[in-house]
Amino acid sequence: MTDAVDSDGGKALGTPADVVQHAEVRAAGHVVQAGRDAVITFRQAARRVAWPVRVGLPPGLADHYRKRPDYDLVAEVLAAGRGEDAIGRTLGVVVSGLGGVGKSQLAARYAWSRWSDASLDVALWISAVSRDAVVIAYAEAAARVLVDRDPQIAERPPEQAAKSFREWLAATSRRWLVVLDDVQDPVDLRDLSPPPSAAGQVILTSRRRDAALRRGEYRVVELDVFDADEAVAYLTGALGRDADPAQLRGLAVELGRLPLALGQAAAFILDQPLLSVADYRAMLADRRRTLAELAPPEDALPEHQATVAATWSLSIERADSVRPGVARLLLEVTSLLDANGTPLGVFTDKSIVDHLADRIGGEVRVEDVHDGLTRLHRYHLITLDPGRPGRAVAVHALVQRAVRDTIAPDRLPAPARAAADALHAVWPEIDTTDAELTQALRSCVDSLRTHAILYTDDLHPVLERAGESLGQTGQVHAAIAYWHALHDEVNAHLGADHPATLTTRHHLVAWQAEAGDLARAVPALESLLADERRLLGADHPRTLATRSRLAWWRAEAGDVDRAAAELESLLADRVRVLGPDHPDTLTTRANLARRRGEAGDPARAAVEYQALLADRLRVLGPDHPDPMKTRQSLAFWRGRTGDLAGAVAELETLLADRLRVLGPDHPSTLITRSTLAQFRGEAGDPAGAAADLTALLADRLRVLGADHPKTLATRGRRAHWLGEAGDPGAAAAELEALLADQRRILGPDHPHIAATAADLARWRGVAPDVGGDRATPS
């Protein structure tokens, strides 16, 4: 029996009912037989495959779609995988990335470039959000491709039909393309992933980056956000060339150059003729607005597209499916910290672990934290990079914003407090030992400050640590700016008389003094002291601390006698309030001894330091930092009494102990080396002093950095001893370079500027030796 075709041999007959009707017209007596023959004929025609076969449909390309550089890589990889000699080589591409970076759009562009190509026999676009979705698509393809060899294929169970189709893909010489878009879980593709074939191509897109997706026959392309030029070009195409380029650049940065966010922002702006890009940026900066409020209405979104926040919601649910709560809560913490990266130790600190346990109502271990972070990483919700310890956990800024939108205001203090506690706990004792880590911690504190209040009762310790870190790494003016901004913020929230506001004033004045602005710092301290006496009382520890700092800076300003008198009074009060062995009482004794030495009585200073050393050793033990500081000061003042050999011997012994207890890079160890070099020079070995200071300078540059005040001081001392060793030209050259750097770093009015200028004049031979002792006791 032949197939039923029209007279031109090109068109099959219609439905079986049509065939029956025609038979009835010809001869009523043959109706039954004719109808049976027509049905058989139709079914045989249906068994013929209509090439090319297309299953599914790629989504349309977004308005103003921009071709990505990664597209050429994908096309190149797929082209290289074709041909008889390509079996076992790369079969296809996995396009992986954060939701919203354009994975589906890249795949769709490639699919559309092939969709109308008649030489491509089979093409499937599958929304692979589940195993069932893949099985159903494969089964549909099987029903259309395998019907000539298995007429009952359409009636077979979907899993069986899908298996048959996959086997066909592996064996056929026909050209095929399979796109598995938005794979949610690699497990869904078990026994379904297209097999290696010289005839086939595969594109798989996923938010996941599991090892299971990185099989040998796949090339992984990590799709990132737009670069700066791509983002601006996209916005220009969407909003018109009349848009202000500076505003477009700013908007691109604020949206993290995420393609989906840029597209939705452009649609939102275009839908409101009176809204400018600048207006939209102002709305975006308003933290009271959610991302959902800044997206177009759902009915205005393109087909297959969801809002930015909704795009990530499923990823978050998937990441949180094991040990529910841990991954989501960790993501909440990351949303409050620096998007560019946070040290891994922050998340494994006890403060965070306890916070997670409290929220989920059960035990949480460090292993659970690692697992939660790993799952977030798999879904591109964060990026783990253990090779950058200081920035090991990074997250896109818009992911942070979307997550923060889900945190109710009454729930925000708990993760914020836990994050602050953890940052403070992992902060290194010495800020200069790991510059990247310290910078990351400071950046995390800055981010945390913008999203949470950390000074309800008083300043959280991490706020103080961040401000002190700036100054201790040589960024004195940055420290002043930090404390000025924090003071204004706290004062606006809590008022001038709140303890937290007083704390910010205390730190602000301290760093103004460190910067050499004593004319402002001393009166400011006097004003602060008056307010603390009024608000806290004369015996409050903070009031006593301000008195100590005021006396210190009076002495630094040159009023040593008055400073010594104030310290005598403070010592009596601290003994009365705190007791004779309290650390603050012992510190006051140290400061008083120093000022007495500076007032012209080094012998008395040495005697008092000797007594203080005995008490500190008794209270704290020999390896505590405070007794070591006292030994440093004792050696210094003995040297100032004229016993240079004794001072050198004591400093050598102290250096050995500091190396043993603190290590070679500890700031106190470096101070001892500096003082030892000074006394060696004064004892008659200027060349040895210059050599010691040259080695010290190299270490301070490495440990502290070029702009740290102590690095600058070492350069000045080294220049001095180079001159004393007979090389005034080198001394002058060093001091000239130092003077320029001091003016740049410290400002034109810092006291050290005048001292360096005087030394420079001396070694140039235009002024007499101004003398002056540059060594400090501790």
Image: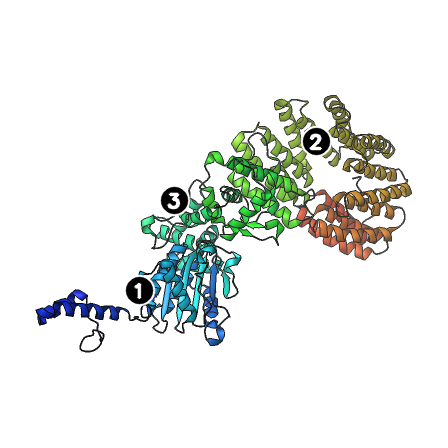
Looking at the image, tell me whether mark 3 or mark 1 is earlier in sequence order. Answer: 1
The residue where tag 2 is placed is 550
In the displayed structure, 480 sits above or below 730; it is above
**Gap in Å between the C-alphas at discs 3 and 1?**
52 Å
Residue 527 on image: x %, y %: 64, 28
In the displayed structure, 124 sits above or below 752; it is below
| Number of marks present in the image shown | 3
Q: Amino acid at mark 1?
A: Gln
Q: Amino acid at mark 3?
A: Glu
Kindly identify which numbered label has been placed on residue 603. Answer: none
Say which residue appears at 51% left-offset and 56% top-offset.
Answer: 209
Q: Is residue 634 left or right of residue 76?
A: right
Quick check: marks 2 and 1 in contact, CB under 8 Å? no
**Gap in Å between the C-alphas at discs 2 and 3?**
52 Å
In the displayed structure, 166 sits above or below 432; it is below
Residue 360 on image: x %, y %: 51, 37
The residue where tag 1 is placed is 152
